[in-house]
Amino acid sequence: MRWVCPSFVGLGRWPFRLAVNGQAQAKMSAKAPLSALATRVPARLPEGRGRFQRPARPQPGRKAMEVLTPLMIQMGINSAQATGNPLIFIPLHKGADGFLSDEQFRKFYWPTLREVILGLIEGGCIPLPAAEGGYSSRLEVVKDLPRGKTVWMIDLTDMADAKRTIGQNACLLGNVPSSLLNLGTPEEVRAYVRRLIEVAGKDGGLIIANGAFFDEAKPENVKAMVEAAKEYGVY
């Protein structure tokens, strides 16, 4: 039996396509409502701070997210039905550590994102939230999801922490660093993959993959990542 699925590897600058069992498949996306809104309407950042500044009247923003929520659910379901691929990629960059306070994340970001994820699950999709950057301070919050229904792409978050929290209910995907794939050696990549499997692979629920950007990786390092997953990812 395998701990990992070594044939599931992101391709391209962002993982809009996946190689599943050796066959490339299109992967469509939805967004967290606050991410979609913040992408179009830039957040105000107080000088010297890197966090979203809550406007004096947040109600219009809340109403906008409530409007966006069913649209994001239906967009994901329509994409899955059109392509025959149930995986729905959900970029979460606007919710990363430091961009929002813990209170803001719990109050503004997570409720509608959770509603989108649950709606996609109900519609027969497999949500694939991408925890871009660090998500260490969010783990205890986002673990509140049905067991065995989601795949979480992990970027910079410590995989041991991710396994302890969201990994109890979800499959983890990641998190071989882009810097290692670009600048490291095949031996370093193999060692990282082995440690990753030891930390987060027990009892299954781990997909070895890159954590973020993939376009500057050395071919020999990608090869080493896949081969190490095949070698060490077994009971």
Image (cartoon, rainbow, N blue to C red):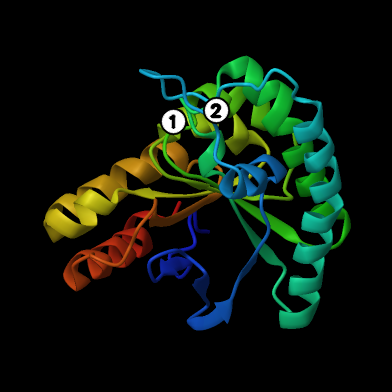
| Numbered disc 2: secondary structure | helix
Q: Which mark is residue 164?
A: 2
- Snapshot quadrant of residue 134: top left
The foreground one among 44 and 83 is 44
Q: Residue at x 36, y 59 (%)?
A: 229
Visible residue check, residue 72? yes
| Residue type at numbered disc 1 | Ala
Q: Position of residue 106 (x, y in %)?
A: 69, 22
Q: Position of residue 23 (x, y in %)?
A: 52, 84
The foreground one among 78 and 55 is 55
Query: Is 8 drawn above or below residue 98 in the view shown?
Result: below
Answer with left or right where residue 141 lies relative to residue 161. Answer: right
| Residue type at numbered disc 2 | Arg
CA gap, disc 2 to disc 1? Answer: 6 Å
Visible residue check, residue 143? no
Residue that carries the numbered disc 1 in the rendered image = 160
Q: Residue at x 68, y 38 (%)?
A: 169
Q: Position of residue 112 (x, y in %)?
A: 78, 38
- Snapshot quadrant of residue 26: bottom right
| Numbered disc 1: secondary structure | helix
Say few, some or many: other residues with alpha carbon within 10 Å of mark 2 (under 14 / 14 to 19 / 20 or more). Answer: some
Answer with left or right where residue 63 lies relative to residue 162. Answer: right
The foreground one among 158 and 96 is 96
